[in-house]
Image: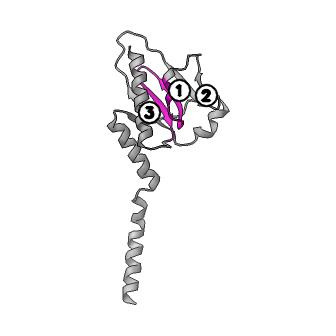
């Protein structure tokens, strides 16, 4: 009986500590982000570029930007753009820009892509595994080479 009371007291004392144990989803996200960092990508929380009702359902969710830094352009004007994927495929947001061919090879989990003076990258909800991250890295590497040529 005394051992049962001691076990109950110890259990109650340790119960709040279980809050700090990462969940399966958190461990998965950490694994993907570590894989991205090892492949030279950076990870940021960014809002999904908005363009109508098609992105409204996803906009409130956890959207993460995986990007690849670009070398400074040194006087050369680099094109800026944003592309969203919907049921019909990729389309530009804002100014009408052609869809880069490399976006056609992106994994289905990628929701959007963008390029600016500092980086090119994709927006997604980390619904994949390290092989998905490797595919994203390969495609972003190809895209950065095209942009810097």
Residue pushed farthest top? 75
Left or right: residue 99 compared with residue 42:
right
Q: Secondary structure at mark 3?
A: helix
Q: Nearer the viewer, residue 94 or 99?
A: 99
Confirm whether the magenta stretch covers residue 109: yes
Residue 68: where, in percent of width, then height?
A: 39, 28
- In the picture, the quarter occupied by the C terminus is top left
Crowd band around label 1 with a 10 angstrom C-alpha radius: few (<14), some (14–19), many (20+): few
* Above or below, comparing residue 70 to residue 127 in the picture: above
Please identify the quarter of the rendering in which residue 22 is found. Answer: bottom left
Residue 83: where, in percent of width, then height?
A: 55, 25
2 and 3 marks in contact (CB < 8 Å): no
- The span shown in magenta is 102-125
Confirm whether the magenta stretch covers residue 110: yes
Q: Which residue is mark 1?
A: 104
Left or right: residue 9 compared with residue 47:
left
- Check residue 136 in the rendering and tell me which mark sits there, or answer none: 3
Marks 2 and 3 sit apart, C-alpha to C-alpha, by: 17 Å
Q: Which residue is mark 2?
A: 89
* Above or below, comparing residue 91 to residue 133 in the picture: above
């Amino acid at each position: 009986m005394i051992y049962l009371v001691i076990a109950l007291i110890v259990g109650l004392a340790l119960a709040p500590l279980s809050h700090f144990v990462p969940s399966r989803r958190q461990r998965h996200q950490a694994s993907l982000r570590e894989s991205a960092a090892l492949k030279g990508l950076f990870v940021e929380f960014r809002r999904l570029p908005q363009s109508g009702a098609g992105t409204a359902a996803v906009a409130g969710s956890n959207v993460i930007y995986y990007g690849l830094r670009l070398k400074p352009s040194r006087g050369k004007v680099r094109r800026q753009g944003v592309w969203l994927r919907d049921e019909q495929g990729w389309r530009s947001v804002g100014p009408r820009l052609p869809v880069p061919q490399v976006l056609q090879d992106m994994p289905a989990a990628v929701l959007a892509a963008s390029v600016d003076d500092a980086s090119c990258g994709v927006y997604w909800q980390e619904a994949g595994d390290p092989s998905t991250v490797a595919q994203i890295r390969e495609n972003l590497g190809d895209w950065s080479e095209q942009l810097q040529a």
